[in-house]
Image (cartoon, rainbow, N blue to C red):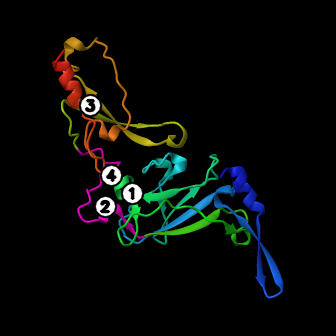
């Protein structure tokens, strides 16, 4: 469904019959509301904190589970909130909440996976003038609460040693395009043998840029394995 279709819901009326009286109710699809959507979330687990923040992962941010622009902030009532503006994409919003990674995605109270969340139309007369649509939601459990689940690595933790073959440095950079604008991310740079030798100070090295950075050199659950780029580069260099 496109936003053109969504906007048509702004003029949708539903007839409600009570005896012989007809009441017309105008519905609004939240994604089509020009002032956006204010998500107010209750965390039933108590696991969400400033050290383990909550994020909204969705099809509108390419399902990034820890997008900095989708980080919820705390409220005085101990709930969490985020204001999501009216999207540019011509699609309905599908989303889930995480604590920064897919191993910490929300699940059902019985520990089973849940389907992607979507939004249903709301009655226009329930929307306060000049304010966003308010959507209140509850998180029952997180996937890392399951028995035997891997302990999540917080995206902001840059103190954990890198488990690589050879020498690598972790850099933090800010920036990106689209939904990643202003995002803080780690860049891991693997250095070839002899890179720091004085004899190589004027040498220029070719650079290979690899995406999916958290798995290139190291293993991060729930992925089944790392790429092994450090072991492969070491083997190729040793083989000449």
Q: Nearer the viewer, mark 3 or mark 4?
A: 3
| Separation (CA) of disc 4 from disc 2 | 12 Å
Task: Give the image location of residue 37, x and y in percent.
Answer: 61, 60
How dense is the environment of label 2, judged by Cα within 10 Å: few (below 14), some, or many (20 and up)?
A: some
Contact between marks 3 and 4 (CB within 8 A): the answer is no
Front one among 58 and 152: 58
Secondary structure mainly formed by the magenta segment: loop
* Magenta span of residues: 140-160
| Separation (CA) of disc 3 from disc 4 | 23 Å
How dense is the environment of label 3, judged by Cα within 10 Å: few (below 14), some, or many (20 and up)?
A: some
Numbered tag placed on residue 154 in the rendering? 4
Give the residue number, with chain letter if any, for mark 3.
229
Q: Earlier in the sequence, mark 3 or mark 2?
A: 2
Q: Earlier in the sequence, mark 1 or mark 3?
A: 1
| Separation (CA) of disc 1 from disc 3 | 28 Å
* Label 3 element class: helix
Q: Residue at x 36, y 58 (%)?
A: 104
Q: Nearer the viewer, mark 1 or mark 3?
A: 3
| Separation (CA) of disc 4 from disc 1 | 8 Å
Give the residue number, with chain letter if any, for mark 2.
144
How dense is the environment of label 1, judged by Cα within 10 Å: few (below 14), some, or many (20 and up)?
A: many
* Label 1 element class: loop
Contact between marks 1 and 2 (CB within 8 A): the answer is yes
Q: Residue at x 28, y 36 (%)?
A: 227
Front one among 190 and 50: 190
How dense is the environment of label 4, judged by Cα within 10 Å: few (below 14), some, or many (20 and up)?
A: some
């Amino acid at each position: 469904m496109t936003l053109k279709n969504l906007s048509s819901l702004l003029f949708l009326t539903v007839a409600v019959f009570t005896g012989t009286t007809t009441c017309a109710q105008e519905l609004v699809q939240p994604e089509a509301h020009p002032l956006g959507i204010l998500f107010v979330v209750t965390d039933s687990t108590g696991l969400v904190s400033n050290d383990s923040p909550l994020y909204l992962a969705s099809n509108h941010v390419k399902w990034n589970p820890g997008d900095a622009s989708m980080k919820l902030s705390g409220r005085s009532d101990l709930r969490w909130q985020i204001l999501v503006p009216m999207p540019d994409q011509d699609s309905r919003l599908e989303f889930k909440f995480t604590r920064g990674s897919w191993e910490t995605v929300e699940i059902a109270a019985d520990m089973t996976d849940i389907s992607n969340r979507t939004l249903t139309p709301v009655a226009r007369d329930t929307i306060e003038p000049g304010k966003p649509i308010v959507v209140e939601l509850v998180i029952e459990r997180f996937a890392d609460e399951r028995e035997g689940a891997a302990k999540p690595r917080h995206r902001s933790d840059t103190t954990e040693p890198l488990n690589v073959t050879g020498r690598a440095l972790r850099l933090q950079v800010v920036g990106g395009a689209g939904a990643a604008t202003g995002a803080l991310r780690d860049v891991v740079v693997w250095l070839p043998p002899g890179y720091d030798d004085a004899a190589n100070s004027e040498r220029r090295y070719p650079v290979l840029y690899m995406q999916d950075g958290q798995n290139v050199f190291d293993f991060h659950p729930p992925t089944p394995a790392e790429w092994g780029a450090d072991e492969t580069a070491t083997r190729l260099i040793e083989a000449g």
